[in-house]
Image: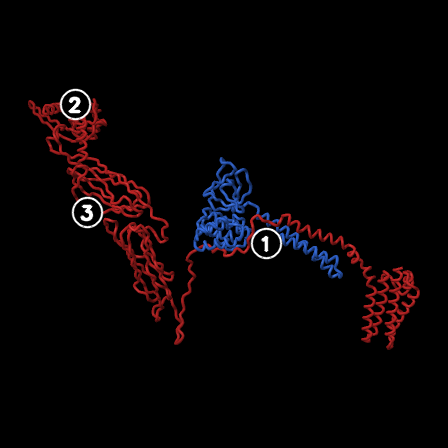
Chain colours: A red, B blue
Amino acid sequence: MKTIIGLLIFLFSFSALAGDVTFTASAPSVVREGGEFQVTYGINAAGGKDLQVNFPASFKILFGPMVGAGSIASNINGVVSSRVNYTYAYTLRATTGGKIEIPPAQINVGGKLYKSNALVVNVLSLSDVERAEQKAKEDERKNQVLIRAFVSKQKVYEQEAIMYTLKLYTRVKVRTPSNKLPSFSGFITHEVDLGQNYTSSVDSYNGLDYNVFTIYQCLLFPQHAGEFVIAPTEMELSVEERVSGGNSHIFGNVFSASRVVKTELKSNQVKVQVKALPTPKPSDFSGAVGKFSLNTSLNTKKLNVNEPITYKATLKGTGNINLIAPIHPNFSSDFDTYDPKVNVKTQVTGSGLQGSVYTELLAIPRFRGEYTLGEVSMSYFDPQAEKYKRLKSPVYNISVASLANDEDSTTERRIGGTSGVRDLVLKEDVARLGEDIRFISTSALVWSQRGARFFGTRMFYLSYLLPLLLALVLFFLLRKHIKALSDVKGRKNKQANSMAKKSLRQAYKKMKADDVEGFYEEVLRALWDYVTHKLFINLADLSKENAEAILLDHGVDAEQVASFFAIIDLCEFARYAPQKEVGGMDRVYEQASIVIGKMESEIKRKKNA
Amino acid sequence: MCFVGVLSCRYGFAQDPDSLFLQGNTHYRNAAFAEAVDCYEALRKAQWESPSLYYNLANSYFKLNKISLAILNYERVLLIDPGHKDAKFNLSLANEQIVDKIEAINEQFGRRLYVNLLSFYSADTWAKISISCFIVALLALFLYFFGKRVGQKKAGFFIGVLCFLFSISGFWLAHLSQARLTAADLAIVFAPSVTVKSNPTAVSTDLFILHEGTKVKILNQDGAWRQVQLVDRSEGWLKVEDIEIINN
C-alpha cells in the first residue's frame, strides 16, 4: 500500500517533464482523529524558498518541514533528460474530527510565486472509548516530562531569604532546555551557580518514576510584606519520543526509531506569604534580616597629627548580607576621612546567604586633642527569634598629639627662640556643617485671648465718657470758685490788707537794715497798693493831684484822706531829703500801719452797713 | 505617662496656658513633634494666642515637614510681632523649601516703619494709652482753671493740649492696628498645585500655576473665587478652598 502510494507520488513528479514547474500538495484522504499523518509539498524546480503553508488550527504541527531532494536522469531513445524534485514534508496530528480543508501553500521559485493545490482530509471521529484511550496516551505523553518549582519556605518575613528551585522530572531523554523565568517582582534575586552538570536523582510523582534534574536555583529576598505569587516558569525543550506502531507516518520508520519533538512545558505557580517586620522598628534598623555579628577595631589609639588611623569593621552572618550597607563610624570633622574600602564575600547556603561585609576606613586627624569615636549601632531582625537585636561597636577614645619636633609640620608654625616656644595654628573659617531652624521659645510671656478686644468696646468708650462727665460735673459745681479765681481784681481786693501788711514788714526789715531809701519806698508802695487794690482804682489813673479827689469820690472819709496824704508827704519828703533821723522811721512805720488799719476798718464798716 | 500627656493636650482648657505650653515644649525637646503640635493646637482652639505659641507651633510643623502649615504660623507670628527675628529667619528657611520662587519686591522703608510703629504695642495697649492721656488732659485742665499761680495755669494749659493730642493719636493708632490685624487679606496656598485663572470661572484662561506654601494677598472675591495678588504683583483668580487665610 505504502509503496504504491510512494510510486504514485514518484510518478506525479514526472509531470514536470513537460518543462513546467509544478507545485503539488499531497496528504492521505482519510485519517483518524488524534492520528498523525504527513502532508507533502513537491516542486520540480530548484531554488524554492519562502514556503508558506496554512494549516487549519485543528491540525497540530508536530514536525516539519522535512526537506527532501531527488533527481532523475533518464535516457529514452537517446534523449537524456534530468529533472529534480524537492519535497517538503510536515507531520501533523488531527485533533478534531470532520472533513477539513488545507488551503494551498505557496512557494517562490526564481521570483515567481507558485501555488499548490488545496487538500481535503477526512478525519474520522473517534468513539468515546477510543477518545478516552487516546487521551490516556496523550496524558502519558504529557507525563513523560514535567517541570516543578519549589520554594524552601512558604511563610517568611520581609528580607528573609527563600530558595527557589526548578526541577525537571523526566522519563525520557531530553536535550537543551531553555527556560523563561518568571519576573520575581517584589524580590531581589541572587542566582545560585549550579555548575556545568545538572545533578540528578530519582523521584516518583503521581505514581510514576522519574529522573529528576535540578536545573535552576536562586535565592529570593522579599522586599515587602504581602502574598506573593511566583508565576510559572515556561520551558521549551526537545524531547526524544519513541515512535510506536499504529499511527505512524510515512517516512519515519525508514529513518529512525525515535524522533525529537519540541515540547513546551509549564511549571506550577508558587505562593509565598511574607510577613511584615514588626513595628516599631528601631531607629538604627536599616533592613538587615538574619543572624549577624559585628567586630570592630582601630589599629591604634594614640597617634600624632597627620598620621593615619585605620578603622576596621567586619559584619558576619547569614541573611540578606548582600543588601546591608557597610558600617560607617562618625569621625569628628577634625579628621579627614577617605572613602572606605568595602569587601563583601557571600556564599549560598540552605538557609540563605552567608558571608561577611568587611569595611576599612582611613582617617587622618588634622588637629591635636582628645577625641571620642562614638559607638556605631546597627539593629537587625532575627526571623527565628522573631525580634530585633542590636549590634554595637565599642566607644573608642583617641588621643592625638602634636608633633614633637619641627621637621614636617604643615599645619602648625612655631615662633622659635631659646625659651618659650609658642605654637601657632593656621586660622580657618568656621566650617558650616549644616543648617536648621532656630529653637522654640521657652516662655510665652504674653498671653491674650483671641478676639478679646478692648479697643472699640463699650467699656473703652465709657472710659472716655466717665472722666469727661465727672470733669463737667465738677466744673459746674465749682464754677463760682473758678469765677472768683479768675476775678483778679476781686482777689487783690481781698488780699489787699494782707498784702499791705506784708509790704510793711518788708519795710521794717529795711528799716532795721538801715536802708532808708528802701524803707520809704516800701512804705509808699504799701500805701498806694493798698488804696488801689482796695478801691479798685488803677494805679495808672492815680496821680498826686487827682488822688485826693478820687479818694473822696470813692467814699473815703476826709479825715482818712488827710492822714493818708500826710504820711505820703512825709515819706516822699524823707525819701528825697534824707536826714538820718533816728526814730523818724519808727514813727512813719507806725503811722502808716495806723492809717492802713483805720482805712481797712472804715471800709469794712461801710461794707457791713 | 505619654498617653496622659496626649490626653491633656487635646483638651486645652482656658485655665492656665503656660502649663500646656511647657508640655508642648517638652514634647518638642524630645523630638515628639506630633504631640507638640497637639498641645499647641489645643491652646489655639481654646482661643489663647501669643507670638511664642505660633512660633513654636510653626517650628513643630517644620520638623514634621509640613511646610505650608509652618509658613502659615510663622506669618501669624509676624502679624502680631513683625520684629520677631527667629520667626523671620525660620520663615526664610521654610520658603526655601517651597516650589515657587517668586522675586519679592522689597518693602518700602516707610511702610516698614509704619508697621513697626503700629505693632509696637497691641491695639488694646494703644487704647489704654489713649485713655490715660485723656484723663491726664482733664487733670491738666483742672490745673489750668484752679491753679492759683500763672505758672500753674500755663503748665496746665500746655500739658492739657499736648495730652489731648496724644490721646487722639493713641486712639488712631489703636484703630489702625486693629484694622491691620483683622483684615483677613493675606493667605497661604495649601493645595499642592493650583491653576490661577484670569476670571472667576473654570472656563477662563489659565494664567499661572502656584504650589503650596506660596503667600498671596486677597484683593477681591466673587462667590467661591478669590482674586489674589502675588508678591511680584501678578494677579489672578483661584478658589477659596485652595488657600488658607493667615489670621483666621
Instruction: Name the residue carrying label 3.
Output: A195
Residue B160 x/y as whole percent: 70, 56
Q: The residue marked by circle 2 belongs to what chain? A: A
Residue sticking out furthest to the right: A558
Dot 3, crowdedness within 10 Å: few (<14), some or many (≥20)? few
Between residue A517 and residue A199, name the one nearer to us. A199
Q: Amino acid at mark 1?
A: Tyr
Which badge, 2 or 3, is on the more N-terminal residue? 2
Q: CA distance from mark 2 to mark 3?
A: 51 Å
Give the residue pinned by disc 1. B121
- Seen in the image, is A113 located left or right of residue A257? right
Q: Quadrant of the C terminus of chain A?
A: bottom right
In which quarter of the view is residue A396 placed?
A: bottom left
* Residue occupied by mark 2: A30
Q: Amino acid at mark 3?
A: Gly
Are both tags, 1 and 3, on one chain?
no
> Which secondary structure lies at badge 2?
strand
Which label lies toward us, 2 or 1?
A: 1
For image coordinates 93% across by 64% down, the residue present is: A558
Chain of the residue under label 3: A
Label 1: which secondary element: loop
Disc on res. A453: none
Look at label 2 and name its amino acid.
Answer: Val
Q: Hey, which residue is sitting farthest left in the picture?
A: A77
Task: Count residues near mark 1 (Cα–Cα under 10 Å), then give few for <14, some for 14-19, many for 20+.
Answer: some
> Which one is nearer the viewer's eye here, A80 or A496?
A496
Residue A539 visible: no
Q: Is residue B214 above or below residue A427?
A: above
How far across and how far down the image is residue A317, in percent? Answer: 27, 54
